[in-house]
Image (cartoon, helix red, strand yellow):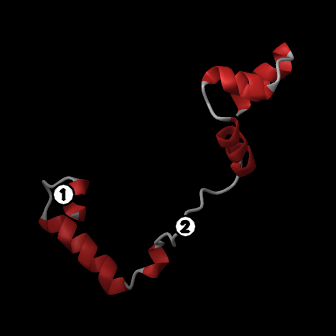
C-alpha cells in the first residue's frame, strides 16, 4: 500500500490505475487499506500463553525435551 500510495503521489497516476497495472484487484487493495495498521485478527480465537494451565506448559516443555531431534512440525502432529 505504501508503494502504491508513494508512486501515485509522485507520478499523479491514480492508485486504482497502478493497482490494476500490478494485476491486483481493486477490492483486495482497498480491503488491505481498511486493515492497514490494525492487528491481524482471525475468525477464531488465537491461543495465548495465559490460556495454558501450568501443568500443560510443563508437559509441553517435557515433551520437547524428550524429543530433541524432532523438528517443530513433527512435534505438533
Residue situated furthest top in the rendering: 11
Report the residue at 21% width, 62% height from top. 75
Q: Residues within 10 Å of mark 2 (few under 14, many from 20)?
A: few
**Left or right: where 61 falls relative to 44:** left
Instruction: Using the image as rendered, state which of residue 4 and residue 24 is in the foreground.
Output: 24
Name the disc covering residue 74, or none.
1
- Residue occupying the point 25% across, 63% down: 76
Q: Is residue 37 left or right of residue 24?
A: right
Residue 54 location (% of width, % of height): 36, 84
The C terminus lies in which quarter of the figure? Answer: bottom left
| Lower sequence index among marks 2 and 1 | 2
Residue 51 locus on image (x, y percent):
46, 80
Say above or below: 49 vs 14.
Answer: below
Query: What is the C-alpha distance between the residues marked 2 and 1?
Result: 26 Å
- Residue 51's disc number: none
Q: Nearer the viewer, mark 2 or mark 1?
A: 2
For the residue carrying disc 1, how many other residues have a C-alpha within 10 Å: few (<14), some (14-19), or many (20+)? few
Residue 37 point in image, percent of width and height? 71, 49
Q: Secondary structure at mark 2?
A: loop
Please determine whether, in this image, residue 52 is positioned above or below residue 66.
below
Q: Is residue 48 above or below residue 30?
A: below
Tell whether label 1 touches label 2 (CB within 8 Å).
no
Give the mark count.
Answer: 2
- Identify the residue at horizontal 69%, vertical 27% (top origin): 19
> Which residue occupies 38% across, 85% down?
53
Tag of residue 43: 2
Counting from the top left corner in percent of width and height, residue 22 is at 62, 23
Which quarter shows the N terminus? top right
Position of residue 63 in the picture relative to residue 30 (left or right): left
Depth order, front residue of 26/57: 26
Residue 59 sits in quarter: bottom left
Q: Secondary structure at mark 1?
A: helix
Amino acid at each position: 500500500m505504501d508503494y502504491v500510495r508513494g508512486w501515485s503521489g509522485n507520478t499523479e497516476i491514480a492508485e486504482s490505475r497502478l493497482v490494476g497495472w500490478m494485476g491486483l484487484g481493486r477490492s483486495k487493495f482497498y480491503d488491505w487499506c481498511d486493515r492497514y495498521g490494525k492487528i491481524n485478527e482471525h475468525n477464531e480465537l488465537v491461543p495465548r500463553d495465559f490460556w495454558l494451565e501450568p501443568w500443560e506448559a510443563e508437559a509441553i516443555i517435557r515433551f520437547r525435551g524428550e524429543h530433541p531431534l524432532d523438528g517443530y512440525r513433527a512435534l505438533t502432529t
